[in-house]
Image (spheres, grey):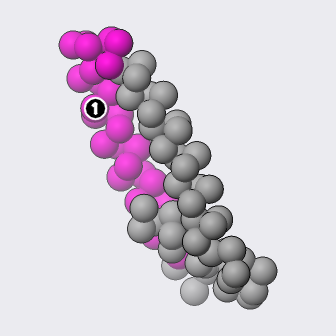
């Protein structure tokens, strides 16, 4: 079960990274300031996502499936 969740997260992270890189390439060529703002907002969103998933899975995090719940949350966001 955990291996599947890890694979799903890995796939979603790769897709997200590809989309972000495509956007950033366009911004870097056309709107360098927007690229800086986007990069900053992306880092902040990732921090929010991780913190939000810790909140959403707080009560189940200490159980045997805790890591799987966090992975599900991160993948869904």
Q: Nearer the viewer, residue 25 or 51?
A: 51
Is 6 placed above or below 45 here?
Answer: below
- Residue 70 visible: no
Q: Which residue is mark 1?
A: 23
Q: Nearer the viewer, residue 63 or 25?
A: 63
> In the rendered structure, which segment of residues is drawn in magenta?
5-34
Q: Quadrant of residue 67?
A: bottom right
Q: Secondary structure at mark 1?
A: helix
Q: Quadrant of residue 32?
A: top left
Identify the residue shown where x is 42% and y is 19%. 36
Q: Is residue 36 magenta?
A: no
Give the percent coordinates (x, y) of residue 48: 55, 49
Identify the residue shown where x is 74% and y is 87%. 64
Identify the residue shown where x is 28% and y is 34%. 22
Give the percent coordinates (x, y) of residue 54: 65, 65
Is 62 placed above or below 28 here?
Answer: below
- Residue 13 visible: yes
Is 75 placed above or below 47 here?
Answer: below
Q: Is residue 27 magenta?
A: yes
Is 59 placed above or below 12 here?
Answer: below
Give the percent coordinates (x, y) of residue 15: 36, 52
Magenta segment's dominant SS is helix
Q: Name the quadrant of the N terminus.
A: bottom right
Label 1 crowd bin: few (<14), some (14–19), many (20+), radius 10 Å? few
Identify the residue shown where x is 42% and y is 61%. 77
Q: Quadrant of residue 34?
A: top left
**Which residue, as the protein is rendered here, is positioned at the far right?**
62
């Amino acid at each position: 079960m955990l291996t599947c969740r890890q694979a799903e997260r890995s796939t979603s992270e790769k897709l997200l990274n590809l989309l972000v890189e495509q956007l950033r390439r366009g911004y870097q060529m056309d709107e360098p300031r927007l690229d800086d703002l986007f990069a900053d907002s992306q880092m902040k969103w990732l921090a929010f996502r991780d913190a939000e998933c810790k909140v959403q899975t707080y009560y189940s995090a200490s159980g045997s499936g805790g890591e799987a719940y966090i992975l599900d949350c991160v993948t869904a966001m």
